[in-house]
Amino acid sequence: MIIDTETFGEIKSAVNQATQGIGTATQLVKGLGPQTEEARTYISRLLNQILEVQVHVQRANAVLDALKDANQEESSQQ
């Protein structure tokens, strides 16, 4: 086994929480309403940063899926 079930579950839970946090952060930032041009620039930058984090979280999910598959394959070969 590459990673034990408990550790995998904890990591998966943390990644899921990150995913939920990204959604919440996006909604909060989008809900800021009308702003000055300067504020809109900062809000745009903030949204871009949130999107970058989202990409990393999606990659983490993909790695976890691959790890889960590898664990299952290794377990079935034993």
Image: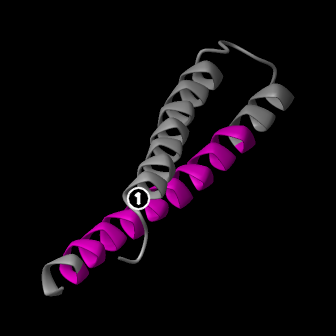
- Which residue of the protein is positioned furthest toward the bottom in this rendering? 77
| Residue type highlighted by circle 1 | Asn
Residue in front for this viewpoint, 52 or 72: 72
Q: Residues within 10 Å of mark 1 (few under 14, many from 20)?
A: some
Overall secondary structure of the magenta stretch?
A: helix
Q: Is 4 contained in the magenta span?
A: no
Residue drawn 80% across the image and 36% down it: 42
Residue drawn 18% across the image and 85% down it: 78
What's the magenta region?
Answer: 45-74
**Is 14 placed left or right of 6 in the picture?**
right
Residue drawn 35% across the image and 76% down it: 1
Residue in front for this viewpoint, 2 or 58: 2
Q: Position of residue 64 (x, y in %)?
A: 39, 64
Residue in front for this viewpoint, 63 or 33: 63
Residue in front for this viewpoint, 13 or 53: 13
In the rendered image of this protein, does residue 13 appear above or below residue 69? above
